Image: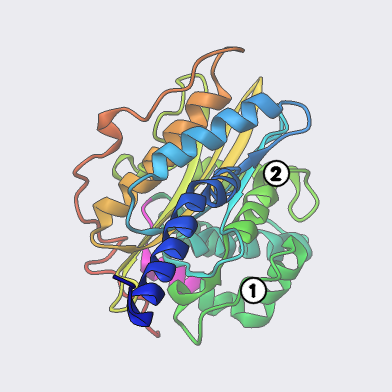
Amino acid sequence: MASSPTTGAHRAIARLIAAATALLPVLAAPATAQAAAYCSSSNNPTLAAGLSKDIANALAGRRDTAAFTVRDTRTGVSCAYHASWHFDSASVVKVTIMGAVLRRAEDEHRKLTDWEANNLWPMITRSDNTAATNLWNDLGRTRLNAFLQLAGMTDTTLGPDGYWGLTQITAADEMKQLDVFAGAPTVLTSASQAYGLNLMNDVEADQRWGTPYGAPADVTVHVKNGWLPRATHRWRVHSLGIFTSPSKDYRMAVLTQDNPTESYGINTIQRIAWAVHHDLNASPGGTTESAPADADVPAPELSDGSAPFLPVRR
Protein backbone atom coordinates (compact mmCIF):
# COMPACT_ATOMS: atom_id res chain seq x y z
CA MET A 1 0.00 0.00 0.00
CA ALA A 2 1.46 3.37 -0.99
CA SER A 3 2.11 5.81 1.82
CA SER A 4 0.22 9.06 1.98
CA PRO A 5 1.95 12.39 1.18
CA THR A 6 1.74 13.26 4.87
CA THR A 7 3.44 10.02 5.92
CA GLY A 8 6.18 10.54 3.35
CA ALA A 9 6.84 14.04 4.62
CA HIS A 10 7.11 12.76 8.19
CA ARG A 11 9.62 10.14 7.12
CA ALA A 12 11.70 12.74 5.28
CA ILE A 13 11.74 14.97 8.36
CA ALA A 14 12.73 11.99 10.52
CA ARG A 15 15.64 11.20 8.20
CA LEU A 16 16.83 14.84 8.39
CA ILE A 17 16.66 14.79 12.19
CA ALA A 18 18.57 11.52 12.34
CA ALA A 19 21.26 12.87 10.03
CA ALA A 20 21.60 16.07 12.06
CA THR A 21 21.78 14.09 15.31
CA ALA A 22 24.57 11.95 13.93
CA LEU A 23 26.58 15.08 13.22
CA LEU A 24 26.17 16.57 16.71
CA PRO A 25 29.25 14.94 18.34
CA VAL A 26 31.40 16.10 15.43
CA LEU A 27 30.09 19.64 15.60
CA ALA A 28 30.23 19.88 19.42
CA ALA A 29 33.83 18.70 19.85
CA PRO A 30 35.59 21.84 18.58
CA ALA A 31 33.31 24.07 20.65
CA THR A 32 34.07 22.07 23.80
CA ALA A 33 37.80 22.12 23.15
CA GLN A 34 37.75 25.84 22.53
CA ALA A 35 35.73 26.52 25.69
CA ALA A 36 38.31 24.67 27.79
CA ALA A 37 41.31 26.53 26.36
CA TYR A 38 41.42 28.98 29.25
CA CYS A 39 45.21 29.20 29.54
CA SER A 40 48.12 29.78 27.18
CA SER A 41 51.90 30.05 27.33
CA SER A 42 54.49 30.23 24.57
CA ASN A 43 57.11 28.87 26.99
CA ASN A 44 55.05 26.18 28.70
CA PRO A 45 52.17 25.09 26.43
CA THR A 46 51.84 21.69 28.12
CA LEU A 47 51.46 23.31 31.53
CA ALA A 48 48.90 25.75 30.12
CA ALA A 49 46.91 22.92 28.55
CA GLY A 50 46.94 20.94 31.80
CA LEU A 51 45.79 23.94 33.81
CA SER A 52 43.00 24.60 31.28
CA LYS A 53 41.80 21.02 31.76
CA ASP A 54 41.93 21.25 35.54
CA ILE A 55 40.06 24.55 35.62
CA ALA A 56 37.43 23.06 33.29
CA ASN A 57 37.05 20.18 35.73
CA ALA A 58 36.78 22.66 38.60
CA LEU A 59 33.95 24.49 36.83
CA ALA A 60 32.11 21.38 35.68
CA GLY A 61 28.57 21.34 37.03
CA ARG A 62 28.79 24.75 38.71
CA ARG A 63 25.58 26.78 38.41
CA ASP A 64 26.93 30.27 39.09
CA THR A 65 28.50 32.73 36.67
CA ALA A 66 32.28 32.99 36.93
CA ALA A 67 35.03 35.06 35.35
CA PHE A 68 38.74 34.92 36.07
CA THR A 69 42.23 35.93 35.06
CA VAL A 70 45.51 34.29 36.08
CA ARG A 71 49.11 35.34 35.38
CA ASP A 72 52.34 33.57 36.32
CA THR A 73 55.40 35.66 35.51
CA ARG A 74 57.73 32.71 36.12
CA THR A 75 56.21 30.20 33.68
CA GLY A 76 54.57 32.68 31.32
CA VAL A 77 51.18 31.02 31.80
CA SER A 78 48.17 33.32 31.58
CA CYS A 79 44.49 32.39 31.78
CA ALA A 80 41.27 34.24 31.09
CA TYR A 81 37.58 33.43 31.05
CA HIS A 82 34.79 35.97 30.59
CA ALA A 83 37.46 38.53 31.41
CA SER A 84 35.48 41.48 30.00
CA TRP A 85 32.20 40.69 31.77
CA HIS A 86 31.10 43.27 34.34
CA PHE A 87 30.28 42.49 37.96
CA ASP A 88 29.34 44.60 40.98
CA SER A 89 32.63 44.99 42.82
CA ALA A 90 31.51 44.50 46.41
CA SER A 91 34.58 44.97 48.62
CA VAL A 92 37.35 44.17 46.15
CA VAL A 93 37.06 47.82 45.12
CA LYS A 94 38.77 48.59 48.43
CA VAL A 95 42.06 47.65 46.76
CA THR A 96 41.40 50.42 44.24
CA ILE A 97 40.56 52.86 47.02
CA MET A 98 43.83 51.93 48.75
CA GLY A 99 45.79 52.44 45.53
CA ALA A 100 44.27 55.88 45.01
CA VAL A 101 45.10 56.93 48.58
CA LEU A 102 48.72 55.81 48.18
CA ARG A 103 49.05 57.52 44.81
CA ARG A 104 47.63 60.78 46.18
CA ALA A 105 50.28 60.82 48.92
CA GLU A 106 52.97 60.28 46.30
CA ASP A 107 51.63 63.08 44.11
CA GLU A 108 51.66 65.40 47.10
CA HIS A 109 55.21 64.29 48.07
CA ARG A 110 54.25 63.26 51.57
CA LYS A 111 53.76 60.29 53.83
CA LEU A 112 50.34 58.95 54.65
CA THR A 113 48.56 60.91 57.34
CA ASP A 114 47.58 59.13 60.54
CA TRP A 115 43.94 59.47 59.49
CA GLU A 116 44.62 57.78 56.12
CA ALA A 117 46.61 54.96 57.70
CA ASN A 118 44.01 54.46 60.42
CA ASN A 119 41.33 53.97 57.75
CA LEU A 120 43.41 51.90 55.32
CA TRP A 121 44.30 49.27 57.90
CA PRO A 122 40.73 48.22 58.89
CA MET A 123 39.42 48.69 55.34
CA ILE A 124 41.78 46.02 54.00
CA THR A 125 42.52 43.72 56.93
CA ARG A 126 38.93 43.31 58.13
CA SER A 127 37.02 44.83 55.19
CA ASP A 128 35.58 47.65 57.28
CA ASN A 129 32.88 49.49 55.33
CA THR A 130 32.93 52.72 57.32
CA ALA A 131 36.65 53.12 56.65
CA ALA A 132 36.05 52.51 52.94
CA THR A 133 33.31 55.14 52.85
CA ASN A 134 35.54 57.62 54.67
CA LEU A 135 38.35 57.22 52.14
CA TRP A 136 36.01 57.09 49.12
CA ASN A 137 34.44 60.41 50.11
CA ASP A 138 37.79 61.97 51.00
CA LEU A 139 39.33 61.05 47.64
CA GLY A 140 36.41 62.11 45.47
CA ARG A 141 35.51 60.76 42.05
CA THR A 142 38.06 62.85 40.14
CA ARG A 143 40.97 61.42 42.11
CA LEU A 144 39.58 57.88 41.92
CA ASN A 145 39.05 58.09 38.16
CA ALA A 146 42.55 59.47 37.70
CA PHE A 147 43.94 56.42 39.48
CA LEU A 148 41.91 54.09 37.27
CA GLN A 149 43.35 55.78 34.19
CA LEU A 150 46.91 55.45 35.51
CA ALA A 151 46.32 51.76 36.18
CA GLY A 152 44.84 51.21 32.71
CA MET A 153 41.57 50.06 34.25
CA THR A 154 39.48 51.62 31.51
CA ASP A 155 36.60 49.12 31.78
CA THR A 156 35.98 49.91 35.45
CA THR A 157 33.17 52.35 36.29
CA LEU A 158 32.84 53.82 39.76
CA GLY A 159 29.62 53.14 41.61
CA PRO A 160 27.12 56.02 41.76
CA ASP A 161 27.43 58.54 44.57
CA GLY A 162 28.53 56.74 47.74
CA TYR A 163 27.76 53.23 46.49
CA TRP A 164 31.36 52.09 46.13
CA GLY A 165 30.27 48.43 46.30
CA LEU A 166 28.38 48.88 43.02
CA THR A 167 31.51 49.84 41.07
CA GLN A 168 31.49 47.86 37.82
CA ILE A 169 34.62 45.73 37.44
CA THR A 170 35.99 43.07 35.10
CA ALA A 171 38.44 40.24 35.70
CA ALA A 172 40.78 41.78 33.13
CA ASP A 173 40.84 45.10 34.97
CA GLU A 174 41.28 43.39 38.32
CA MET A 175 44.44 41.74 36.99
CA LYS A 176 45.67 45.24 36.09
CA GLN A 177 44.80 46.24 39.65
CA LEU A 178 46.93 43.41 41.01
CA ASP A 179 49.74 44.43 38.66
CA VAL A 180 49.74 47.87 40.30
CA PHE A 181 50.88 46.24 43.54
CA ALA A 182 52.86 43.25 42.26
CA GLY A 183 54.26 44.42 38.92
CA ALA A 184 56.78 47.04 37.94
CA PRO A 185 56.54 50.16 40.14
CA THR A 186 55.06 52.48 37.52
CA VAL A 187 51.74 53.54 39.10
CA LEU A 188 52.98 53.23 42.69
CA THR A 189 56.50 53.35 44.08
CA SER A 190 58.07 50.20 45.50
CA ALA A 191 57.47 51.54 49.00
CA SER A 192 53.74 52.07 48.32
CA GLN A 193 53.48 48.63 46.72
CA ALA A 194 55.06 47.04 49.79
CA TYR A 195 52.67 48.94 52.08
CA GLY A 196 49.63 47.69 50.18
CA LEU A 197 50.91 44.11 49.99
CA ASN A 198 51.59 44.14 53.72
CA LEU A 199 47.96 45.03 54.42
CA MET A 200 46.70 42.32 52.05
CA ASN A 201 48.99 39.83 53.78
CA ASP A 202 47.52 40.75 57.19
CA VAL A 203 43.87 40.12 56.29
CA GLU A 204 42.09 38.49 59.21
CA ALA A 205 41.99 34.70 59.26
CA ASP A 206 38.24 34.38 58.66
CA GLN A 207 38.58 36.38 55.43
CA ARG A 208 41.47 34.43 53.92
CA TRP A 209 39.25 32.11 51.90
CA GLY A 210 38.98 32.05 48.12
CA THR A 211 42.08 32.43 45.97
CA PRO A 212 44.52 31.43 48.78
CA TYR A 213 42.97 27.94 48.93
CA GLY A 214 45.64 25.37 48.12
CA ALA A 215 48.58 27.80 48.16
CA PRO A 216 51.80 26.03 49.17
CA ALA A 217 53.38 26.84 52.52
CA ASP A 218 56.40 28.54 50.98
CA VAL A 219 54.29 31.16 49.20
CA THR A 220 53.37 34.49 50.80
CA VAL A 221 49.65 35.17 50.36
CA HIS A 222 48.13 38.60 49.73
CA VAL A 223 44.33 38.58 49.43
CA LYS A 224 41.25 40.78 49.29
CA ASN A 225 37.76 39.36 49.03
CA GLY A 226 34.33 40.82 48.42
CA TRP A 227 30.80 39.54 48.91
CA LEU A 228 27.44 41.15 48.28
CA PRO A 229 23.86 39.78 48.13
CA ARG A 230 21.30 41.62 45.98
CA ALA A 231 17.93 40.80 44.47
CA THR A 232 19.51 40.59 41.02
CA HIS A 233 22.24 37.97 40.44
CA ARG A 234 21.88 36.89 44.09
CA TRP A 235 25.28 36.56 45.81
CA ARG A 236 28.34 38.16 44.22
CA VAL A 237 31.49 36.58 45.67
CA HIS A 238 34.96 37.67 44.50
CA SER A 239 38.55 37.01 45.48
CA LEU A 240 41.83 38.67 44.46
CA GLY A 241 45.16 37.03 45.28
CA ILE A 242 48.87 37.74 44.83
CA PHE A 243 51.28 34.90 45.61
CA THR A 244 55.02 35.45 45.94
CA SER A 245 58.22 33.78 47.09
CA PRO A 246 61.87 34.10 46.07
CA SER A 247 61.10 31.81 43.12
CA LYS A 248 57.38 32.37 42.48
CA ASP A 249 55.26 35.30 41.36
CA TYR A 250 51.69 34.72 40.23
CA ARG A 251 48.33 36.29 40.79
CA MET A 252 44.66 35.61 40.11
CA ALA A 253 41.32 37.38 40.14
CA VAL A 254 38.11 35.35 40.33
CA LEU A 255 34.68 37.00 40.14
CA THR A 256 31.35 35.18 40.59
CA GLN A 257 27.66 36.00 40.72
CA ASP A 258 24.31 34.18 40.54
CA ASN A 259 25.35 32.18 43.61
CA PRO A 260 22.47 30.71 45.66
CA THR A 261 24.54 31.30 48.81
CA GLU A 262 27.80 32.96 49.69
CA SER A 263 29.32 29.56 50.44
CA TYR A 264 28.52 28.38 46.92
CA GLY A 265 30.51 31.26 45.43
CA ILE A 266 33.42 30.65 47.80
CA ASN A 267 33.49 27.01 46.76
CA THR A 268 33.57 27.89 43.06
CA ILE A 269 36.52 30.20 43.66
CA GLN A 270 38.35 27.64 45.77
CA ARG A 271 37.95 24.91 43.18
CA ILE A 272 39.59 27.19 40.59
CA ALA A 273 42.25 28.34 43.04
CA TRP A 274 43.24 24.79 43.96
CA ALA A 275 43.80 23.94 40.29
CA VAL A 276 45.95 27.05 39.81
CA HIS A 277 48.10 26.49 42.90
CA HIS A 278 48.46 22.77 42.25
CA ASP A 279 49.50 23.08 38.61
CA LEU A 280 51.74 26.15 38.89
CA ASN A 281 53.63 24.55 41.76
CA ALA A 282 53.71 20.94 40.53
CA SER A 283 56.98 19.30 39.59
CA PRO A 284 57.63 19.05 35.83
CA GLY A 285 55.74 16.15 34.33
CA GLY A 286 53.40 15.90 37.31
CA THR A 287 49.92 14.52 36.77
CA THR A 288 46.80 16.64 36.94
CA GLU A 289 44.22 15.98 39.63
CA SER A 290 40.74 17.12 40.52
CA ALA A 291 40.22 19.47 43.44
CA PRO A 292 39.96 17.66 46.79
CA ALA A 293 36.57 17.30 48.42
CA ASP A 294 37.32 19.90 51.07
CA ALA A 295 37.53 22.60 48.40
CA ASP A 296 33.76 22.68 48.92
CA VAL A 297 33.48 23.95 52.44
CA PRO A 298 30.32 24.92 54.36
CA ALA A 299 31.64 28.44 54.87
CA PRO A 300 29.55 30.75 57.09
CA GLU A 301 27.60 33.62 55.64
CA LEU A 302 29.88 36.61 56.19
CA SER A 303 29.00 40.23 56.78
CA ASP A 304 31.88 42.03 55.01
CA GLY A 305 32.52 44.32 57.98
CA SER A 306 28.88 45.08 58.74
CA ALA A 307 25.79 42.88 58.92
CA PRO A 308 24.29 42.65 56.40
CA PHE A 309 26.58 44.25 53.81
CA LEU A 310 24.92 47.03 51.85
CA PRO A 311 27.02 49.89 50.42
CA VAL A 312 25.13 52.87 51.75
CA ARG A 313 25.33 56.51 50.74
CA ARG A 314 27.04 58.48 53.46
Residue corresponding to mark 2:
191
SS category of the residue bearing label 1: helix
In the image: residue 30, left or right of residue 57? right
In primary-sequence order, the first of circles 1 and 2 is 1
Residue 81: % across, % down: 57, 53
Residue corresponding to mark 1:
144
Span of residues in magenta: 126-135
SS category of the residue bearing label 2: helix
Q: Provide the major secondary structure of the magenta segment.
A: helix
Q: Label 2 amino acid?
A: Ala
Q: Can I make out residue 202 in this image?
A: no
Q: Label 1 amino acid?
A: Leu
Tell me: residue 157, above or below residue 33: below
User: Going 75% across and 59% down the picture, which residue do you hit?
Assistant: 106
Residue 43: % across, % down: 77, 27
Front position among marks 1 and 2: 1
